[in-house]
Amino acid sequence: MNITDRHQFILQQLQEKGKVDIQELSDALQVSGVTIRKDLKLLEEKKLLYRTKGGGSTQNPYTIEKPINEKEFIKTEEKKKIAKAAVDLIGMNDSIILGSGTTVFELTHLIHPSKHLTVITPALKVALELCNRPFVDVLQIGGLIHPSSSSAAGSFAERLLDDISCGMMFVGVDGIDPEFGLSITNLAEASLIMKMIHLAQTVVVMADSSKFDRRGIGRICSLEQVDYIITDKLVSPDTVKMVTERGVKVIIAE
């Protein structure tokens, strides 16, 4: 076989199997492993395959697959309704904080301001969604990025907030309990969220009804520190009464 025939054979094997092995190609084509490595190098230069350890593949071996976030598929309709109710609260604020979490991320799809708006966020996903949006400036809070949330946390992130004030904060939680307060399951992010709550003039919690009467491991604030809770219509009347008695306005997203 000449070089053209070898390349056609290699590409055919790739199409059928998705990957090729140097030793197997060497045996099939009756050429040395050195020759096969040169063939794979030429095919990679033509962007026809990716070289891997011991062979080649149609998939880039350096691409890291993002782990599936199961929360993205839970109560999706409720989250969209909560986001729709939340966007109306932005009003005339010229700066807002958006936390991490799937419910808050739904809000990013609806933010299309007609005047300048600064969005402060530790969440990479939020920043990427909004960074090219007209009239939106994004202040990305840096720091150690946690894989579970793709969001920054830690002392570096907190120091960035030392000289900042903000009109309104939108935050998602994993638990709302009358005694324990509001909490999340990601303990690493709790301290940063607490600091963001203190610098916001108005705090809006976005949480579906399943989050009530639950506790996450990391407490972020008491109910009295919250101005609004936006939730879905499945929340019980007794729960709404309990929350409103603490001075929190409850918005039921329809």
Image (cartoon, rainbow, N blue to C red):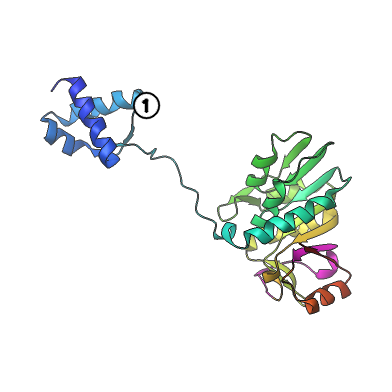
Viewer-side residue, 48 vs 35: 48
Rendered image quadrant of residue 25 = top left
Q: Examine the structure image and report whether residue 91 is included in the region drawn in magenta.
A: no
Q: Is residue 22 left or right of residue 142?
A: left
Rendered residue at 75%/33% (across/down)? 134
Q: Residue at x 64, y 63 (%)?
A: 187
Q: Is residue 9 above or below residue 154?
A: above
Q: Which residue is mark 1?
A: 47
Q: Position of residue 186 (x, y in %)?
A: 62, 62
Q: Which residue is the extreme one toward the left?
A: 30
Residue 176: tell me if it is visible: yes
Considering every residue shown, the one lying at the far front of the view is 254
> Could you tell me residue 215's position as x and y percent?
67, 73
Which amino acid type corresponds to the residue marked 1 in the rendered image?
A: Lys
Front-lying residue, 17 or 54: 17
Q: Position of residue 123 (x, y in %)?
A: 66, 48
User: Residue 172: horizontal and vertical position, in percent?
Assistant: 71, 60
For the C terminus, the quadrant is bottom right
For label 1, the SS is loop
